[in-house]
Image (cartoon, coloured by chain):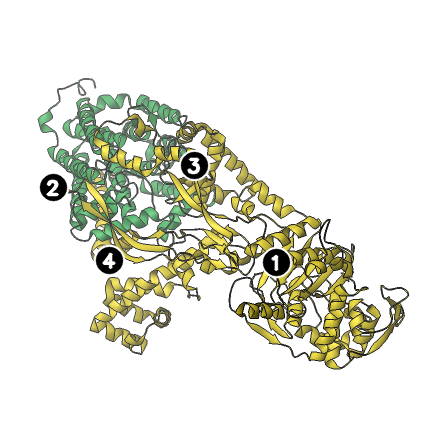
Chain colours: A yellow, B green
């Protein structure tokens, strides 16, 4: 009985060993080639060559954004000699603690443990002379990033922006050359210098985005941020798909080498496989196979089938741009995690970041020469394929940094939120675009929590680009559009006169004009220059709501201007179909640019730019490119003439709403604008837009010089009061600066000068 | 029976040389592959040779003292073992587990030795009682097992704790405990494990099991070890890539390759043939140990041999099964092959006990024990 039981036990254990043998047959003999292929792939990776991000330059080559080196320490989580706080614990922490409070508590615990118990941290503190806590929190942040970005074998920043001396001192102590020395001197005795070496810690220099112009142009240039873990995850997902695409296509071609397999594939696909060029097509066809077809192919193709099978499981490839494809090819371990988050940095991200280069590297073992057994070995890297890096391209803006800086400063000096934009009517090029308050993108990039918080919690909302994202009632500025529409529709002629007696009755309501007791009888030009409301009430009633809305839409209101900065808003304007539902009161209110119309400063600037170029609407742009005409609006010369007379009156006729801003001295000891630039005549319109809650918004918009327009502009000061009193003087200053930078010489004067030199 | 157990000189010549040869074979495999698996700067081969030397000394010691004498103090030794297991829980954790006493120049893992002390105690208990043949009488050996097992789980060291269970069953089975009773205990154990899974198991432990069930899904994270092991084994093919030329081994892409996954290195470098050789040596060792158990009449000796052999054999099975993906990843060494001091020495002591039993022919007055 006992002996039988012992025999049974023996047999049981031997059967267990036999099971291992059977499994070995399966793994090594039957599927050996498959696993060998997998093993080869596991030893292969892409080695990245980072490239500098392109610069953002103004029209004269002034730098708005560029890369600068930042010196610091980075650590490779897998190599850094920590005894108690392991990356795997941090991963568990992220899984276990859902609430940020609990997580923060745990984080604090690890930070304390790092500071108190970890030799490596203490050694680093001694080396650098820094506070242990500071290093512990840097190390903790690096570990956490390594875990979140799944980059435990890559370097993650610990502390950056170190001064050069400290950094160079550290580099002598920590750089890989020291490690090499240690390896070479393995057989000699360890010296004291070897003992302070901290593996996994590297002195690195990395590119940091800098914005030398600071807040000037911040809303145009925007800023960069970092890919978040989720984004990296999706990139990595795509990377997995794209990375193998080429190897799959290679495998497919290899499969076609054997005539048998080729016949089989031809049968299975029902068409000539040679004719298939695109990877996506192969993928689709493979997925169309039934199970039996797959099994037959699998049996015949052996290891070649493996990558093809992956293909079947892969998700559909969306259309990634070429840049993205290369970018995601690298398992989401980006050479550069920076990505544009706003402004031109965002819209031109593809070009700016360039394409990092990479080599497909495979690691092999090579025996050390002169040894019988290969216990001593060296690692050899074979470079299979290389992709050259393409540095990021510089982006040239139309902005003139000198002018932009001045505009921003003047606007900031007002002390109230506001926006200003200047466009060249002939091309649509934006020469300056400013929104106040502004922010310093350097503060955002620095990652310093306090300064980032200060920007985001500023009640003035500096991140808002008011030029394209602020929607305001246009106020009287809109009258120009009404006048243009009415003249074109024939609702009025340049000579039509209406009488203004301060009050205008619509139903039971009274609408007023600013002038008391009224302007008396006046025609369109004077109505514009003196900004008479009553004239436009009557004009709008003659014009009708539908025509008004159709024209307003044609002038570009109620839709995006197509500026090449992301985030533009369309403003609000009822569609022509809604015209019949609008009450008479609404119509009358719309005629002077009040509720329900809202516009962005950009739309207003574009409208005046269109008037300046006689009906040609150019797409506004900040990035240098050839001009593009969006719309051509046929405006008759009579209309333009009438509008021009009205708009010139605003600044050049006594009684014009902005007369004093351009005819009074600009400051102590300075001449007036008109006195300084007698050749520059300004066609413009003021606006005082009532809105709920606060003083009216002050508008000033127009173009100049009136007879050969160089610049169109729009300016708004939120809650600024009267347009002629608040906005116009500010605009006058800005224009003053513009014409100082770009002196205007009238065509006939230039001709005279030219003919004189010829003589 | 003092004269029966009288001290006699050890007859070294009649030691089971076949057993020794099998052990030597395993040790040789170990030396070669620890050498191949060690990293460039490491001194593990040298240390392994020292462990083997100490192991041989321990082996001689284990053969020298008559096992019957040893069994007289089995309970006291068992108590010492429990004290050690409690004490080790108060040490500073290494790799998040309190399993080692750090004695400066080397570390000792008490659980490796407690296994053997536990076998002596169980052997003594079963050999001197009859009540374990009733279901109600099984609670004593069960408690004697659960105490060290619980303490080891507390460290936590699932792999070592797990080994106790089959050894206990093998000893009870060999001692002719009733099969239905064993089945009852086994069944409730499985039910308990299910409850454990639902209620107590930690996230990472569950994930390991899920990863084992579906390695490719988890290949980058939890099944990394398994996946690397499978790749290395598979790419070994029939004859292997040659000693010291295993790509995944040499590039350090196989984790714990000199301890838990040393079998993987054998498979990668010597292929199917090399592995078969290792399995045959293991098989011969197991068979010859059980052969000793069969030939022994003295009940304590029988149980010691069955216990030690089951322990070593089960450990070898778990280790190889984990490597080839038949079991979820758990850290158990391959006896005599893996790198590790405590494990090596305790294996030598264990096999020394087996040889000890084989060497001594104690007469018994009873009829063939465990036959009824």
Q: Residue at x 22, y 54 (%)?
A: A28
The answer to whether A673 appears left or right of B227 in the picture is right
Give how far across and how far down residue A400 sits, in percent.
Answer: 56, 57
Which mark sits nearer the N-terminus, 2 or 3? 3
Q: Residue at x 79, y 68 (%)?
A: A589
When the figure is inspected, residue B216 is found, relative to residue B87, above or below; the finding is below
Image mark 3: chain: A
Q: Which residue is mark 2?
A: A372
> Which residue extends farthest bottom?
A490
Image mark 2: chain: A
Q: Which residue is mark 4?
A: A31
Which mark sits nearer the N-terminus, 2 or 4? 4
- Which labelled disc corresponds to residue A433? 1
Numbered disc 1: secondary structure:
strand
Query: Mark 2 vs mark 4: same chain?
Result: yes
Q: Which residue is mark 3?
A: A164
**Looking at the image, do the residues carrying marks 1 and 3 touch, with CB atoms under 8 Å apart?**
no
Badge 4 density bin: few <14, some 14–19, many ≥20, Cα 10 Å: some
Numbered disc 4: secondary structure:
loop
């Amino acid at each position: 009985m006992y002996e039988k039981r012992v025999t049974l036990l023996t047999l049981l254990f031997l059967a267990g060993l036999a099971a291992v043998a059977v499994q070995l047959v399966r793994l090594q003999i039957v599927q050996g080639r498959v696993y060998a292929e997998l093993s080869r792939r596991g030893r292969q990776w892409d080695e990245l060559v980072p490239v500098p991000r392109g610069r953002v330059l103004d029209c004269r080559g002034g730098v708005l954004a560029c890369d600068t080196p930042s010196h610091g320490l980075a650590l490779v989580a897998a190599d850094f000699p920590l005894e108690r706080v392991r990356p795997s614990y941090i991963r568990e922490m992220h899984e276990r603690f859902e609430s940020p409070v609990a997580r923060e508590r745990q984080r604090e615990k690890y930070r304390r443990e790092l500071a108190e118990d970890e030799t490596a941290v203490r050694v680093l503190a001694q080396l650098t002379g820094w506070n242990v806590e500071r290093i512990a929190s840097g190390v903790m942040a690096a570990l956490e990033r390594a875990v979140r970005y799944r980059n435990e074998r890559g370097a993650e920043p610990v502390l950056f922006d170190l001064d050069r001396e400290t950094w160079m001192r550290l580099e002598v102590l920590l750089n890989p050359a020291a490690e090499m020395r240690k390896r070479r001197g393995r057989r000699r005795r360890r010296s004291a210098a070897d003992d302070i070496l901290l593996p996994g810690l590297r002195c690195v220099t990395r590119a940091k985005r800098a914005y030398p112009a600071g807040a000037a142009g911040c809303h145009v240039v925007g800023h960069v941020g970092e890919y978040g873990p989720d984004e990296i995850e999706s990139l990595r997902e795509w990377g997995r798909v794209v990375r193998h695409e080429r190897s799959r296509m290679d495998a497919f071609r290899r499969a076609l080498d054997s005539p048998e397999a080729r016949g089989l594939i031809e049968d299975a696909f029902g068409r000539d496989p040679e004719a298939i060029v695109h990877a996506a097509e192969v993928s689709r066809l493979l997925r169309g196979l039934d199970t039996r077809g797959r099994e037959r192919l699998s049996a015949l193709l052996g290891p070649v089938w493996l990558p093809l099978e992956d293909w079947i499981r892969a998700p559909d490839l969306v259309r990634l741009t070429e840049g993205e494809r290369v970018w995601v090819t690298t398992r989401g371990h980006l050479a550069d995690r920076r990505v544009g988050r706003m402004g031109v940095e965002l819209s031109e991200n593809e070009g700016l970041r360039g394409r990092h280069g990479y080599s497909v590297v495979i690691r092999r073992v090579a025996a050390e020469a002169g040894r019988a057994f290969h216990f001593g070995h060296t690692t050899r890297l074979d470079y299979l394929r290389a992709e050259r890096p393409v540095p990021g391209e510089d982006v040239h803006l139309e902005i003139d940094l000198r002018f932009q800086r001045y505009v921003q400063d003047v606007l900031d000096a007002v002390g109230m939120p506001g926006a200003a934009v200047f466009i060249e009517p002939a091309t649509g090029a934006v020469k300056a675009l400013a929104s106040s308050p502004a922010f310093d993108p350097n503060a955002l990039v620095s990652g310093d929590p306090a300064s980032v918080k200060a920007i985001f919690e500023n009640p003035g909302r500096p991140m808002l680009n008011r030029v394209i994202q602020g929607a305001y009632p246009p106020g009287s500025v809109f009258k120009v559009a009404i006048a243009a529409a009415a003249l074109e529709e024939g609702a009025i002629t340049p000579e039509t006169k209406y009488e203004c007696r301060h009050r205008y009755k619509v139903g039971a309501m009274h609408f007023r004009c600013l002038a008391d007791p009224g302007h008396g009888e006046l025609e369109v030009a004077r109505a514009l220059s003196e900004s008479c409301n009553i004239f436009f009430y009557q004009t709008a009633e003659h014009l009708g709501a539908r025509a008004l809305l159709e024209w307003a839409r044609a002038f570009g209101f109620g839709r995006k201007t197509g500026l090449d900065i992301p985030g533009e808003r369309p403003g609000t304007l009822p569609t022509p179909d809604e015209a019949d539902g609008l009450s008479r009161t609404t119509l009358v209110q719309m005629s002077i640019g009040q509720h329900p119309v809202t516009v962005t400063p950009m739309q207003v600037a574009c409208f005046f730019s269109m008037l300046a170029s006689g009906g040609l609407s150019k797409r506004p742009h900040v990035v240098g490119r050839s001009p593009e005409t969006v719309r051509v609006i046929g405006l008759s010369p009579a209309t333009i003439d009438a509008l021009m007379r009205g708009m010139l009156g605003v600044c050049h006729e006594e009684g014009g709403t902005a007369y004093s801003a351009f005819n009074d001295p600009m400051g102590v000891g300075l001449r007036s604008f008109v006195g300084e630039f007698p050749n520059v005549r300004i066609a413009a319109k003021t606006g005082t837009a009532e809105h709920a809650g606060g003083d009216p918004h002050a508008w000033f918009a127009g173009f100049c010089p009136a007879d050969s327009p160089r610049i169109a502009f729009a300016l708004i000061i939120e809650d600024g009061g009267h347009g002629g009193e608040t906005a116009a003087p500010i605009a006058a200053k800005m224009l003053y600066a513009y014409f100082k930078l770009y002196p205007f010489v009238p065509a006939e004067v230039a001709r005279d000068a030219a003919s004189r030199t010829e003589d | 029976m003092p004269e029966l157990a009288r001290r006699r000189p050890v007859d070294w010549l009649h030691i089971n040389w076949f057993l020794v040869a099998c052990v030597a074979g395993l040790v040789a495999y170990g030396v070669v592959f620890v050498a191949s698996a060690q990293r460039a700067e490491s001194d593990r081969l040298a240390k392994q040779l020292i462990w083997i030397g100490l192991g041989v000394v321990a082996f001689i010691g284990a053969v020298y003292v008559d096992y019957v004498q040893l069994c007289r103090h089995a309970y006291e030794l068992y108590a010492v073992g429990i004290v050690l297991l409690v004490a080790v829980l108060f040490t500073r954790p290494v790799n998040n587990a309190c399993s080692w006493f750090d004695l400066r120049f080397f570390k000792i893992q008490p659980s490796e030795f407690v296994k053997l002390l536990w076998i002596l105690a169980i052997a003594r208990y079963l050999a001197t009682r009859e009540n374990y043949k009733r279901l109600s009488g099984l609670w004593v050996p069960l408690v004697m097992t659960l105490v060290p097992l619980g303490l080891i789980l507390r460290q936590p060291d699932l792999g070592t704790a797990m080994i106790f269970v089959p050894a206990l069953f093998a000893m009870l089975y060999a001692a002719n405990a009733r099969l239905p009773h064993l089945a009852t205990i086994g069944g409730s154990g499985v039910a308990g494990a299910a409850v454990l899974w639902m209620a107590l198991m930690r996230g990472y432990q569950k994930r390991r099991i899920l990863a084992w069930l579906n390695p490719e899904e988890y290949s980058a994270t939890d099944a990394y070890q398994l996946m690397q092991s499978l790749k290395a084994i598979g790419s070994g093919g029939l004859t292997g890539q040659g000693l010291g030329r295993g790509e995944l081994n040499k590039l350090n892409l196989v984790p714990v390759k000199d301890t838990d996954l040393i079998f993987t290195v054998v498979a990668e470098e010597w292929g199917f043939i090399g592995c078969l050789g290792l399995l045959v040596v293991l098989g011969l060792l197991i068979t010859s140990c059980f052969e000793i158990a069969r030939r022994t009449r003295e009940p304590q000796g029988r149980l010691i041999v069955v216990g030690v052999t089951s322990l070593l054999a089960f450990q070898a099975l778990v280790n190889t099964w984990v490597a080839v993906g038949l079991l979820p990843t758990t850290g158990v060494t391959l006896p005599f092959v893996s790198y590790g001091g405590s494990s090596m020495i305790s294996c030598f002591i264990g096999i020394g006990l087996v040889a000890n039993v084989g060497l001594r022919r104690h007469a018994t007055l009873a009829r063939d024990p465990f036959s009824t």
